[in-house]
Amino acid sequence: MPESEPEREEETTSDVERRRRRAQFLRELNEAKALRDRVQPRRARAARMRQQMRMRTFRW
């Protein structure tokens, strides 16, 4: 039984690390999208329109 304790602790630390890396990745992804939208406003507008159309035609 005592052998599983360090393993569980290691699992939680790796999970915390994974969540931290994921949060960092999502922040950077949002920054990149915002930058792309500023640099290419026409393309960004077209992408928004496509997304809206996709949401309108989506069946629940």
Image (cartoon, grey):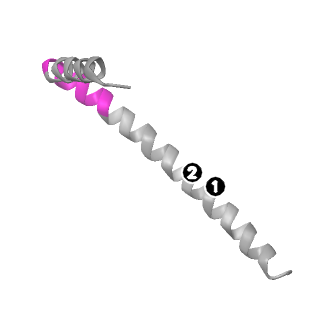
Describe the element under mark 1 as helix, strand or loop. Answer: helix
> Looking at the image, is 45 positioned above or below residue 24?
above
Magenta stretch?
33-42
The tag on residue 27 is none
Q: Amino acid at mark 2?
A: Arg
Describe the element under mark 2 as helix, strand or loop. Answer: helix
The tag on residue 19 is 2
Tell me whether circle 2 and circle 1 mark residues in contact (CB < 8 Å): yes
Q: What residue is shown with label 1?
A: 16
The residue most toward the front is 60
> Looking at the image, is 21 positioned above or below residue 37?
below
Q: Position of residue 48 (x, y in %)?
A: 24, 20
Q: Position of residue 16 (x, y in %)?
A: 63, 55
**37 and 3: which is toward the camera:** 3
| Residue at 62 percent of width and 59 percent of height | 15
**41 and 2: which is toward the camera:** 2
Left or right: residue 27 versus residue 36 is right
Q: Amino acid at mark 1?
A: Val
What kind of secondary structure does the magenta stretch mostly adopt?
helix
Tell me which corner region of the image, top left, top right, bottom left or bottom right, holds residue 3: bottom right
> Looking at the image, is 3 positioned above or below residue 9?
below
**45 and 54: which is toward the camera:** 54
Q: Position of residue 2 (x, y in %)?
A: 86, 80
Q: Position of residue 20 (x, y in %)?
A: 56, 50
Q: CA distance from mark 2 to mark 1?
A: 5 Å
